[in-house]
């Protein structure tokens, strides 16, 4: 998506809200918006409208066809972060990130009511005073919202100060009144002088003290604490990360595809993580492994040792999932495995396994299941042309076994890896985004785009 199309979609979202009678305003530095969208689109809506925003964005996506709502992350009790993805043919996915809140809370502590932010909203204008087609808070509310956010996050820099100083100029007395709601005495004077002069050095030095003073005036609420706890429990029960496994014989293009999809889909998550084969509890296993030129050349373990190895792998996958992988998923991480336990059943020689295959298959049912398992499939002769590490017949056998295995999986997806790399990557990205979109709709309880809100 070009920058101009990205801007058009952002404006269209706001127009759609107005058509649905949603009272909103864009908060934060919106001077260059929507022509430039450097990060999230911070939007405030009435608390009563907040619960319907996910379904409303789903309807918006259905209206435009190419857009998909792929992520919903509740980062505060009254704040939902969404990711909308557009994937055109043979292109990298592009994302919009509406961050929509009702009342402004931070870590469960109440700061500003949505009603007071929305009450004096005005249409944003450019430097010539021409309306830009969307709403922003009045200067005092924009000033205090932005100031509270930057001080509480401890990240107020000179570029942030420029925006605060511009809002101050529009209504100095109103902005000063807002400062005194949260700070008194010397703290209030430091902030007022900085806003008036646009000199923020003294504020940067005093950020920690200003944050501490702020939290002293924010009342503790047992109910707010309880709701915040429930939010965190919900995040654990329904992680916003995604566990994806990429399978395929040597030569199917796993490494090349993984190198592309991780940065392509990273904007839909907080973090990304590559893992080779297994969690490897107790040691890092996040770097690329040295290619194996002769995977069948090593001597197989004995039957007893092979059975013991399977138990060890089961322990690694199960305990490693609980201690390493699951926490990553809770923290909204895109976890991509290059190979997984299932490779042992397809290619036992590679893993020096000489035990009974029925035993390895029975244990597979106990291994934590990925959210998506993708098989990169291509004709055996093409795979041999790329990497001739095993005989042709062995490649043909492995291909048949992978197809059978993934075909039995509820979350298994087969991608044609005989295409050019760009086409393969596009297909894999689309398959993953489709899964994320369906998961988000399911969590919203929105099974049909045509359903009523």
Image (cartoon, rainbow, N blue to C red):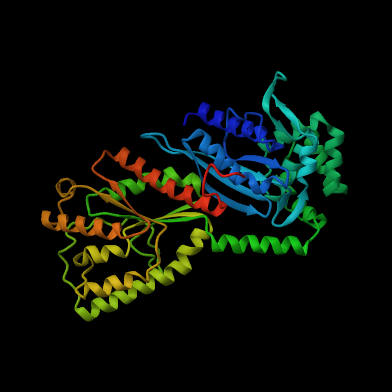
Q: Is residue 183 above or below residue 362?
A: above
* Quadrant containing the C terminus in the rendered view: top right
Would residue 251 be found to the left or right of residue 148 on screen? left
Horizontal side, residue 201 vs residue 302: left or right: right
Image: 412 above or below 203: below
| Of residues 201 and 118, the one drawn nearer to the viewer in this rendering | 118
Outermost residue on the front side: it is 451
Left or right, 281 with reference to 39:
left
Q: Residue 302, how many percent across, how many down?
A: 19, 78
Residue 290: which quarter of the image? Answer: bottom left
Q: Quadrant of residue 24?
A: top right
Between residues 255 and 234, which one lies in front from this camera angle?
234
Residue at the image point whose x is 82% and y is 39% from the top: 192
Asked whether residue 342 is in view, the answer is yes
Q: Residue at x 22, y 47 (%)?
A: 378
Q: Looking at the image, which residue sits at the far bottom?
A: 304
Q: What residue do we see at 22% from left, 60% from top?
A: 401
* Residue 198 seen in the figure: no
């Amino acid at each position: 998506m070009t920058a101009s199309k990205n801007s058009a979609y952002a404006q269209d979202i706001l127009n759609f809200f107005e058509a649905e009678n949603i009272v909103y305003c864009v908060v934060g530095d919106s001077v260059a918006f929507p022509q430039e969208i450097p990060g999230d689109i911070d939007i405030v809506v009435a608390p009563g409208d907040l619960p319907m925003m996910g379904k409303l964005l789903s309807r918006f996506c259905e209206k435009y066809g190419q857009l998909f709502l792929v992520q919903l992350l509740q980062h505060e009790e009254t704040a939902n972060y969404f990711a909308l993805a557009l994937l055109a043919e043979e292109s990298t996915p592009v994302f919009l990130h509406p961050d929509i809140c009702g009342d402004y809370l931070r870590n469960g502590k109440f700061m500003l009511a949505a009603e007071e932010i929305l009450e004096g909203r005005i249409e944003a204008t450019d430097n010539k005073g021409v309306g830009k087609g969307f709403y922003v808070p009045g200067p005092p509310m924009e000033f205090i919202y932005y100031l509270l956010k930057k001080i509480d996050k401890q990240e107020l820099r000179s570029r942030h100060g420029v925006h605060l100083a511009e809002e101050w100029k529009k209504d100095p007395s109103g902005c000063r009144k807002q400062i005194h709601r949260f700070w008194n005495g010397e703290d209030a004077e430091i902030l007022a002088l900085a806003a008036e002069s646009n000199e923020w050095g003294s504020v940067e030095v005093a950020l920690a003290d200003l944050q501490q003073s702020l939290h002293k005036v924010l009342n503790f609420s047992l109910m707010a604490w309880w709701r915040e706890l429930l939010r965190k429990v919900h995040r654990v029960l329904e992680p916003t990360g995604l566990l994806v496994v990429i399978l395929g014989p040597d030569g199917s293009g796993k490494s090349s595809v993984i190198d592309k999809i991780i940065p392509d889909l990273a904007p839909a998550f907080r973090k990304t993580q590559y893992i080779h084969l297994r969690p490897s509890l107790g040691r890092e296993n996040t770097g690329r492994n040295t290619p194996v030129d002769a995977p069948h050349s090593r001597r197989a373990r004995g039957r007893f040792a092979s059975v013991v190895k399977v138990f060890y792998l089961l322990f690694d996958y199960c305990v490693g999932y609980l201690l390493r992988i699951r926490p990553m998923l809770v923290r909204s991480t895109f976890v991509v495995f290059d190979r997984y336990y299932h490779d042992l059943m397809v290619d036992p020689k590679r893993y020096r396994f000489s035990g009974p295959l029925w035993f390895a298959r029975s244990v597979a049912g106990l291994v934590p299941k990925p959210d998506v398992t993708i098989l990169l499939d291509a004709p055996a002769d093409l795979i041999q042309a790329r990497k001739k590490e095993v005989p042709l017949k062995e490649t043909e056998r492995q291909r048949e076994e992978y197809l059978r295995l993934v075909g039995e999986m509820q979350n298994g997806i087969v991608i044609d890896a005989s295409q050019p790399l760009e086409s393969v990557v596009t297909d894999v990205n689309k398959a993953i985004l489709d899964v994320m979109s369906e998961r988000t709709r399911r969590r919203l309880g929105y099974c049909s785009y045509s359903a009523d809100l």
